[in-house]
Image: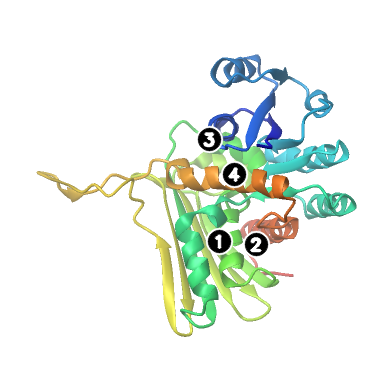
């Protein structure tokens, strides 16, 4: 059986997840290389995953002759250049979202990919690979709710008293670019991906994390995006939940509505005791989308091996970024931003 020889750049929180999937759960992949500036992370890759080739320099990993594809799970500011470098080294590329925090950089990546159409490039918008979101998408496009008109989508993160998200905000692009970009991409996909936005308006507040003020960020935000064809997406995000992670996406159409998620259930167990009746919650986004993260890895690898287009395009990633950055601009400037 043909197996894709893969290297991974970045072995942090999400990098380890992708590395474990590639090494243990993606049947048609072979994780043969890893790159990270941390010696401890590389030692983990050798010890736990048996990765044969380990690099502290990305260019050195790209120079490995038998490497066919790379997974990029590095800080957002590095994504665009690392994708370009990989394409020029004749490697297929999977990159975690977002593509970039600069539209010109997104377009530069698109242009580079167009020069080498035989190479596959995919950005990891994981909700497109979730079973429930796919079911909703199929029902909508089969006409079950008529013409889809409005998407209401929120993502709620558990409060992190360690201050991680405050530090991360310096390079994340802000709550809409980092967190709500998933809701934005899902909204475009569920409504009709080719649609262009016409204007956005966003507002927000700092409830618990005062350190975010230094980076013009908030820990609670709400944004409205209108599309040129009339559809509307209402996006909200919070990073101060006490109970855990949850996301909900509702699509309203001319003949009905479809809702995905909402309660943040960890499983189907219901506990009844002296405190009442309750269920446990998913603590982080990864537990909610664990199967979908594996599925996106599998589908990217298979797209390369089968020489077929990935299920989402670089233009999808660019448009999601365009909307997210406009929301951040609206939040900062307290005004409607038109396209």
Q: Regarding mark 1 in the picture, which secondary structure is present there?
A: strand
Q: For residue 330, which numbered disc appears in the image?
A: 2
- Contact flag, marks 4 and 2 (Cβ < 8 Å): no
Alpha carbon of mark 1 to alpha carbon of mark 4: how far?
Answer: 38 Å
> N-terminal of the two: label 1 or label 4?
1
Query: Quadrant of the image for the C terminus?
Result: bottom right
The one of 152 and 94 positioned closer to us in this rendering: 94
Mark 2 and mark 1: span between their CA atoms?
7 Å
Q: In this rendering, which labeled residue sits more in front, label 2 or label 3?
A: 3
Which mark, by number, is residue 4?
Answer: none
Please give the residue where the numbered disc 1 appears in the rendered image. 203
Judging from the image, what secondary structure is the residue with disc 4 in?
Answer: helix
**Residue extending furthest right?**
115
Left or right: where does residue 321 sit relative to residue 44? right
Of mark 4 and mark 3, the one earlier in the sequence is 3
> Residue 249: horizontal and vertical position, in percent?
46, 63
Residue 19 % position (x, y): 59, 31
Q: Look at the image and tell me whether residue 133 can be seen.
A: yes
Q: Residue at x 61, y 16 (%)?
A: 46
149 relative to 8 in the view: left or right:
left
| Among the two numbered marks 4 and 2 on one chain, the one whose residue lies closer to the N terminus | 4
Q: Report whether 155 appears left or right of 281.
A: right
Task: Find disc 4 in the rendering and name its residue.
Answer: 298
When the figure is inspected, residue 103 is found, relative to residue 161, above or below; the finding is below
Q: Within 10 angstroms of label 3, few (less than 14), some, or many (20 or more) residues?
A: some
The front one of 293 and 230 is 293
Discs 2, 1 touching: Cβ within 8 Å: yes
User: Residues under labels 4 and 3: Cα distance?
Assistant: 9 Å
- Residue occupying the point 48% across, 72% down: 139
Name the residue tied to disc 3: 25
């Amino acid at each position: 059986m043909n197996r894709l020889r893969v290297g991974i750049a970045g072995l942090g929180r999400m990098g380890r997840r992708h590395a474990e999937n590639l090494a243990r759960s993606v049947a048609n992949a072979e994780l043969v290389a890893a790159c990270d500036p941390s010696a401890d992370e590389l030692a983990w890759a050798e010890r736990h995953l048996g990765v044969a080739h380990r690099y502290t320099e990305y260019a050195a990993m790209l120079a490995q002759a038998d490497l066919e594809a790379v997974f990029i799970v590095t800080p957002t500011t590095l994504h665009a250049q690392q994708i370009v470098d990989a394409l020029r080294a004749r490697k297929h590329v999977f990159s975690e979202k977002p593509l970039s925090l600069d539209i010109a950089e997104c377009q530069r990546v698109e242009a580079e990919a167009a020069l080498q159409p035989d190479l596959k490039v995919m950005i990891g918008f994981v909700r497109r690979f979730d079973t429930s979101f796919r079911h909703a998408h199929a029902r909508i496009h089969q006409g079950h709710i008529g013409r889809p008109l409005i998407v209401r989508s929120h993502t709620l993160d558990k409060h992190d008293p360690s201050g991680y998200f405050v530090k991360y905000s310096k390079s994340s692009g802000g709550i809409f670019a980092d967190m709500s970009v998933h809701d934005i991409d899902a909204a475009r996909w569920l409504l009709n991906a080719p649609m262009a936005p016409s204007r956005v308006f966003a507002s927000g507040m700092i409830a618990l994390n005062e350190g975010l003020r230094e980076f013009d960020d908030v820990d609670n935000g709400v944004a409205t995006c209108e599309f040129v064809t009339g559809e509307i997406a209402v996006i909200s995000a919070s990073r101060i939940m006490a109970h855990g992670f949850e996301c909900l996406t509702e699509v309203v159409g001319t003949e009905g509505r479809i809702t995905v998620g909402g309660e943040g259930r960890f499983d189907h167990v219901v506990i009844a005791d002296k405190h009442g009746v309750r269920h446990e919650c998913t603590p982080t986004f990864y537990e909610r989308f664990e199967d979908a993260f594996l599925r996106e890895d599998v589908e990217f690898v298979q797209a390369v091996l089968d020489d077929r287009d990935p299920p989402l395009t670089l233009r999808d990633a660019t448009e999601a970024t365009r909307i997210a950055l406009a929301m951040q601009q609206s939040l900062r400037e307290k005004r409607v931003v038109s396209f």
